[in-house]
Amino acid sequence: MRILFVSTIDRLLTSGIKIILSDAPAEKFKEFAKSVEENVLMLRLSKKHMVGRDLGNL
């Protein structure tokens, strides 16, 4: 698991460096952000949260 985490961080940093050093970093960042939004992030409300629950009735 640790090797996977380091490899993932390394790839993320490499992507950031490529974006910064590109001829059009703003455009490259927009493409990267869109790709992350479409392929990686899945933001949903968790059913495990205690939001809205009466803690007195546990």
Image (cartoon, grey):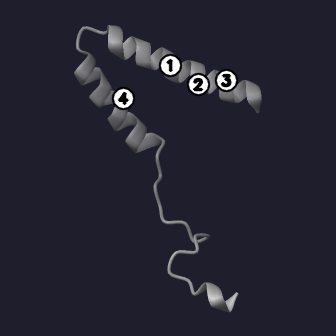
How many other residues sit within 10 Å of disc 1, few (<14), some (14-19) or many (≥20)?
A: few
Q: Are marks 1 and 3 in contact (CB under 8 Å)?
A: no
Say which residue label 3 marks.
Answer: 6
Give the Cα distance between marks 4 and 3. Answer: 20 Å
Say which residue label 1 marks.
Answer: 13
Residue 50, image x, y percentages = 58, 74
Say which label, 4 or 1, has the lower sequence index.
Answer: 1
Question: Is residue 6 toward the left or the right of residue 34 in the image?
Answer: right
How many other residues sit within 10 Å of disc 2, few (<14), some (14-19) or many (≥20)?
A: few
Say which residue label 2 marks.
Answer: 9
How many other residues sit within 10 Å of disc 3, few (<14), some (14-19) or many (≥20)?
A: few
Residue 32's tag is 4
**Relative to 34, is 17 above or below?**
above
Q: Are marks 1 and 2 in contact (CB under 8 Å)?
A: yes
Give the Cα distance between marks 4 and 1. Answer: 13 Å
Give the Cα distance between marks 1 and 2. Answer: 6 Å
Say which label, 1 or 3, has the lower sequence index.
Answer: 3
**Relative to 6, is 51 above or below?**
below
